Amino acid sequence: MSVDAAAIAEILGGPAVLGRPIKSLRDLDAAVRGGIPKLALDRLISFFAPPDRHRYLGAGLRNKIVPRATYQRAERLNPQVSETTERIARLYALALSAFQDPDLAARFMMRPHPELDDRVPFDAALTEIGGREVEEVIERGLHGLPA
């Protein structure tokens, strides 16, 4: 199961944040290669950090993706950080499509999972290989397959 590029873009704030409509993976790739606005990262983090804990939890999550000093001085994220941000947004979109509930999808992304050796999917997704592992867990869950 794949996730539509427009759904990923919507999680990142859509055209209002990304500055362009995203209708295809090619559009999304161009946005990532050009560096997505840091506001897109803020939007993504808001799905995982409840408003009452956003200041501290959100900053901690954001700092796992991009160093604080880099975040503070840049308006756009570099391509590497943009790619990590897109990956986490894609996996959240995939979890959302599996669970059909934003809270359940966020909970899945933020709690240790036994099929990931008790790593948190958000943390595992900080690398490409870890992201693939998270994707496999979601896919297996969708299809009822054992680990």
Image (tube, rainbow, N blue to C red):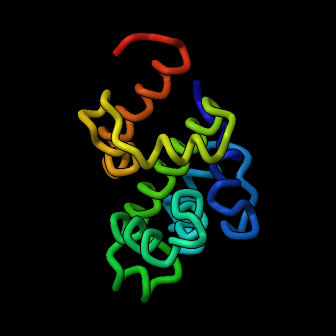
Rendered residue at 38%/40% (across/down): 131
Q: Quadrant of residue 120?
A: top left
**Residue situated furthest bottom in the rendering:** 73
- Most foreground residue, 18 or 120: 120
Q: How many marks?
A: 0
Q: Position of residue 110 (x, y in %)?
A: 43, 49
Q: Give left or right: position of 147 versus 90.
A: left
Residue 98 drawn at (x, y percent): 61, 29
Relative vertical location of residue 131 with respect to residue 147 in this rendering, above or below = below
Residue 44 position within the rendered picture, expressed as x and y whole percent measured from the top left: 56, 61
Instruction: Pinpoint residue 121: horizontal percent, then vertical percent.
Output: 38, 43
Q: Is residue 83 left or right of residue 26?
A: left
Whether residue 37 is situated above or below residue 91 in the rendered picture: below
Residue drawn at x 56%, y 36% as measured from the top left:
95
Residue appearing at x 46%, y 45% in the figure: 109
- The extreme front residue here reads 52
The front one of 145 and 90 is: 145
Position of the N terminus by quadrant: top right
Q: Quadrant of the C terminus?
A: top left
Q: Is 93 on the left-hand or right-hand side of 17?
A: left
Q: Quadrant of residue 100?
A: top right
Residue visible at 72% across and 60% down?
Answer: 14
